[in-house]
Image (cartoon, rainbow, N blue to C red):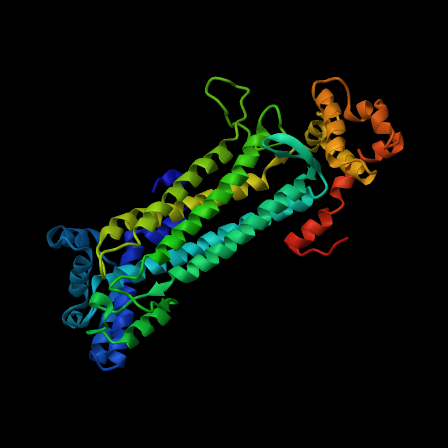
Amino acid sequence: MIPRYARAEMTDIWTPETKFRIWFEIEAHAADAMAEIGMIPREAAKVIREKGSAATFDIDRIDAIERETKHDVVAFLTHLSEIVGPEARFVHQGMTSSDVLDTTLAVQLARASDILIADVDRLLAALKTRAFEHKMTPTIGRSHGIHAEPTTFGVKLAGFYAEFARAKERLQMARKEIATCAISGAIGSFANVDPRIEEHVAKALGLAVEPVSTQVIPRDRHAMFFATLGVVASSLERLATEVRHLQRTEVLEAEEFFSAGQKGSSAMPHKRNPVLSENLAGLSRMVRAYAMPAMENVALWHERDISHSSVERYIGPDATITLDFALNRAVGMIDKLIVYPERMQKNLDLPAGLVNSQRVLLAFTQKGVSREDGYRLVQKHAMRAWNGEGALLDLLKADPEVTAKLSSKELEELFDLGYHFKHVDTIFARVFGTARK
C-alpha cells in the first residue's frame, strides 16, 4: 500500500489493530457459542469477552511472540492468554488457525466492499448530474478515433452511468460471495468444534456459513471477488481514456479542472495535462494485476496449503485500497470536468458534413438505388470532401447522378443535425428510468 494512493477509511480496515480486534471477536463469539451448548463454562466465556473487549492489544508484544513461535495466530492467542488469564484455556477450543484467518479476511473484504459500493454510488451521482446537464449537447461520436456520427455528450455520460450501475451490481454479488464464515476445525470436519458454533459466529459477524470448508474457505470465492475489482477498474480506465482523448489539444472538447497555482510541467509553463485520468489508467492496471494471483490461489493442495496466504496479505489491502482511491478520484474528475460545447460543435463541423454520409446512403436505397451503387456515389463525394474539395452537401448537389434521385431540398434535410438526437429521451429513460418527453 502506498500512502499517496490511499484513503483512511479503507486503510483502517487493514491495520493490525483492526485485524487483531476481529480475531478477538471471532474467538469471543465462538466462546459464547461454546458456553451456550455446554462445551465450556459460561463464566469463562464471560471473562474472555469482558477482558478481551477492554484490552488494547500490544502489537509489539504479539510480534515479539511471533518471532519465537513463527506462527501469527499462536502469537495472538498467547498474548490474549496474558490478558484473559486462566480462562484463556477455553479460547480456540477445537478451532484451527484458518478458522480465524479466513473468517477475518471475509469480514475485511465485506467491509471493503461496502466502501467500494458507496464509492460507486458517488460516481453514479456525478455521472448522472453531468449527463442531464449535457443531455442535448451535440458532439461527435468516434469509431477507431475517427469521426463517425453525431451523438450528445449526455448520451456518452449515460453510457458510463449504465456501465457503473453494472459495476455496483457486480460488487454487490462479489460481497455476497466473499462474506462467508468457516469455524470447522482441522480439515473442516467439525470433529472438535460443533457446527452450531460456526452458525453462531457467522450470524454475529453478518456472514453466511461456508457449506464445505476444507480447513480453508474455497478460494474460488476470492478469485471471483478480485476479478470483479479488476472489471470495475477496467471501466474506470475506459472513463479515464475518454477524458484523456477529449483533452488533447487538437480535440479539447473537455478537460480536467486546473486549479489556481497548479503546474502542468516543470519545463513548459503552458501545460495543462490530464494527470487525473492518466493516474486512473495506471491505478486500474494495478487493480487488474491482483486478479491473476487470486485465480492462481484457487488450486490449493488437498484440504489446504498456505501458498495463498502470502498472496492475500498483498492483494487484500492493495486491491481494495487502490480501487477505493481511484473511484474517489474519478468522482472528483467528473464533478469538476470542464466541458466545451462550442468546441464540440466546431469539431462536428470540421469534416464538411461527412458525418451525414449514412443518411444519404439510406435515402438512395429508399429511392430504388442498390446499396452498392448508393455507397459508390456517396463515397466518391465523401472522399472528395475529405480531401478538401468542398462540403459534402455541395458536392452531392452538383452531381446530376445524385440529383436524379434526390432533390436539393431532400439532400438538405438529410444534413439536419437534430435528426440524430430524436431518441435521446429513449436512451435516458432506459438508463435513468426517466419519463420520455
In the image, taking residue 210 as reference, residue 410 lies left or right, namely right
Q: Residue at x 16, y 60 (%)?
A: 74
* Residue 152 pos. (x, y %): 69, 40
> Outermost residue, bottom direction?
38
Q: Residue at x 21, y 79 (%)?
A: 39
Query: In the rendered image, which quarter is residue 250 located in?
Result: top right
In the image, taking residue 102 as reference, residue 163 lies left or right, namely right
Question: Where 334 sits versus 101, above or below?
Answer: above
* Residue 172 pos. (x, y %): 47, 58
* Residue 13 pos. (x, y %): 36, 53
- The N terminus - image quarter: top left
Q: Residue at x 62, y 27 (%)?
A: 251
Q: Residue at x 52, y 42 (%)?
A: 330
Question: Where 252 sits versus 316, above or below?
Answer: above
Q: From this viewpoint, is residue 71 visible?
A: yes
Question: Where 346 sits versus 79, above or below?
Answer: above
* Residue 234 pos. (x, y %): 47, 43
Give the number of callouts: 0
Q: Nearer the viewer, residue 81 or 316?
A: 316
Q: Nearer the viewer, residue 222 or 37?
A: 222
Q: From this viewpoint, is residue 53 visible?
A: no
Query: In the rendered image, which quarter is residue 137 located in?
Result: top right
In the image, taking residue 273 as reference, residue 67 lies left or right, namely left
In the image, taking residue 217 as reference, residue 111 lies left or right, namely right
Question: Where 400 sits versus 76, above or below?
Answer: above
